[in-house]
Image (tube, rainbow, N blue to C red):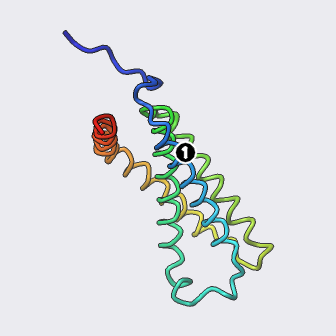
Amino acid sequence: MTEPPISPFDVSRRHPLAARLARYATVALLLCLFIGTHYPGHHIPHEIAAADKILHCVAYLGLAFSVLVSLDLAIGQLQPKHYFTVWLVGTLYGAFDEITQIPVGRHCDIHDWFCDMLGIIFALIAFRLTRPALSRLLRLLKIEMAVS
């Protein structure tokens, strides 16, 4: 006998506490990212400025991955529309982030925006590849907490 398919909105597959913690971490990361990208440019150490493109890619990878984890914990297994939404919102936020740097004396750089998008794409791929392992880990933690 085969098991019925699990609905992506199956409440038993959700993790409300973990979802809330992931959401807080995502908001904190977003705030740090916004503050970091809007810090006046003349105060940025040369070492950080030299790694600017890598930092953009890593920051948006972390932000998008965090959003994906938060969504997955809140609603269950993500569908293609969720991945597209994360990509679209992340890409639009990256453009907004670049444009709003102008008033604080920073430069709006299309190459930074491309690195932001690249980070988002890396996050989408990394999440898809690691989701089964993350899901198993959460199941184990849930079982251990139930036994305790």
Residue 47 place in picture, x, y as percent: 51, 88
Residue 42 place in picture, x, y as percent: 69, 88
- Image quadrant containing the N terminus: top left
Query: Which residue is disc 1 drawn over?
Result: 86
The residue most toward the left is 1
Q: Quadrant of residue 128?
A: top left
Residue 124 place in picture, x, y as percent: 43, 48
Write the residue at 57% across / 69% down.
111
Tell me: 102 left or right of 67.
right
Q: Nearer the viewer, residue 8 or 86?
A: 8
Write the residue at 46% across / 34% down.
80
Tell me: 6 left or right of 104.
left
The residue most toward the front is 148
When the figure is inspected, residue 35 is found, relative to residue 9, above or below; the finding is below
- Circle 1 SS class: helix
Write the residue at 46% across / 24% down.
11
- Image quadrant containing the C terminus: top left
Q: Nearer the viewer, residue 8 or 48?
A: 8
The residue most toward the top is 1
Residue type at mark 1: give it.
Val
Tell me: 42 left or right of 113.
right
Write the residue at 59% across / 52% down.
90
Q: Quadrant of residue 86?
A: top right
Q: Nearer the viewer, residue 88 or 18?
A: 18
